[in-house]
Image (cartoon, rainbow, N blue to C red):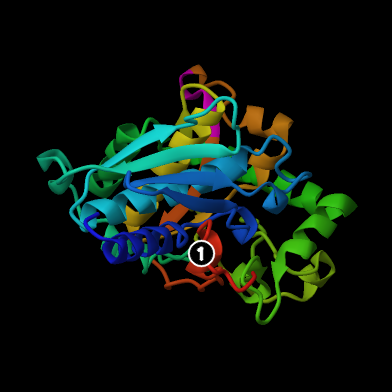
Amino acid sequence: MTSTLTACTTEHLLVTAAAAAPSIHNTQPWRFSLAPGTGTLTVHAVPHRALPLTDPDTRALHVSVGAALCNLRAAAVHLGREPVVRLLPRPDAPGQLATVRLAGRPRLGLLRHPDLYRAIWRRRSCRLPFSPTPVPESVIDELAEAARLDGAELHRPAPAESARLLRLTAAADTRNALDPGRTAETLARAARPGDALGVPAYASGPLDAAGLLPMRSFGDPRDRPSRDRAPFEPEPRLLLLTTRHDLRADWLRAGQALQHVLLLLTLHGLRASMLHQALEWPDLRALMTAGHPDRCAPQMLLRIGYGPTGFPTPRLRTTALIDGAPSGGE
């Protein structure tokens, strides 16, 4: 960064890209600070945006911040800088989740990969039905390699295993709908017109007409019977993202791998929805990898395919995310 103007512009661009990442219930639980003269951004958790009932151990919060880190890295490479990431840099400050130092020009290895930056602005979760067009195995191979580069594994469940994962997701979906505390928490995080946080009800998508695929509702669960229904693909293509261990650093790695996969999907014209429900219940989460000791800790279940663009969700202003910048409130 050669000048104050350049530093401010670069910081703004990086944070804007980072903040376009998906997060649980669109809580956007991140904040950024710049160490003057170092070219280093620090990424902080925002505890008051956590979900105490849905995400009591903050695993999903860390995955969300990891996704923002992936975007930040992609933006840095696009701007001609090498992002040097350090996870959990200060044990005495658990709210500091990562630092990203902008070094010199990117390594050739990074420049050989697709430019993920251009997908950041096109990526959206899609909770609508996908077409029956199969996803090429060569694309899934590419996604799996991307996940490995970021310290995770991407598994391709066979049809019987996919059906079992969907049953676990449906069981979690029912639990969530019947749990007053979680229902209240979800409703409190639902976006209303003009809100910069939360998921609007219009982004929920329809329910599966056949009842095979549970789709999360971000509105009042009492409205579920009246929601539109549509036929979804009879055998959804699922991908299961796992990590070798299940510590905070692994959650951050999983988030980076998840977003890497989502951005590559976008470049290939594919869409994804995140089936997170079973991961919110410890007993159901443990069952997601039952019988597969090689899969270790499940971090996200994805449904992928060719389909509509999906719906945008609101975002906080970039200046509201940078320490020391005039935010004008949230």
Relative side of 38 to 216, left or right = left
The one nearer the camera, 6 or 242, is 6
How many marks do you count on the picture? 1
SS type, badge 1: loop
Question: Residue at 44% of width from left, 32% of height from top?
Answer: 87
Relative side of 133 to 61, left or right = left
Q: Position of residue 325 (x, y in %)?
A: 51, 64
Q: Is residue 215 magenta?
A: no
Q: Is 277 drawn above or below residue 231 in the view shown? A: above
Q: Amino acid at mark 1?
A: Ala
Quadrant location of residue 85? top left
Residue 133 visible: no
Classify mark 1: residues with Cα within 10 Å, few (<14), some (14-19) or many (20+). Answer: few
Quadrant location of residue 45? top right
Q: Quadrant of the C terminus?
A: bottom right
**Which residue, given by chain and number where applicable, does mark 1 sit on?**
325
* Outermost residue toward the right in this view: 180
Question: Residue at 61% of width from left, 71% of height from top?
Answer: 196
The one nearer the camera, 80 or 237, is 80
Quadrant location of residue 127? bottom right
Q: Position of residue 105 (x, y in %)?
A: 14, 46
Question: Residue at 42% of width from left, 39% of height from top?
Answer: 99
The one nearer the camera, 243 or 214, is 243
Q: Position of residue 275 (x, y in %)?
A: 58, 50
Q: Is 56 drawn above or below residue 199 in the view shown? A: above
Q: Position of residue 39 (x, y in %)?
A: 32, 47
Region rendered in magenta: 294-298
The one nearer the camera, 44 or 281, is 44
Relative side of 180 to 66, left or right = right
Question: Residue at 36% of width from left, 52% of height from top?
Answer: 72
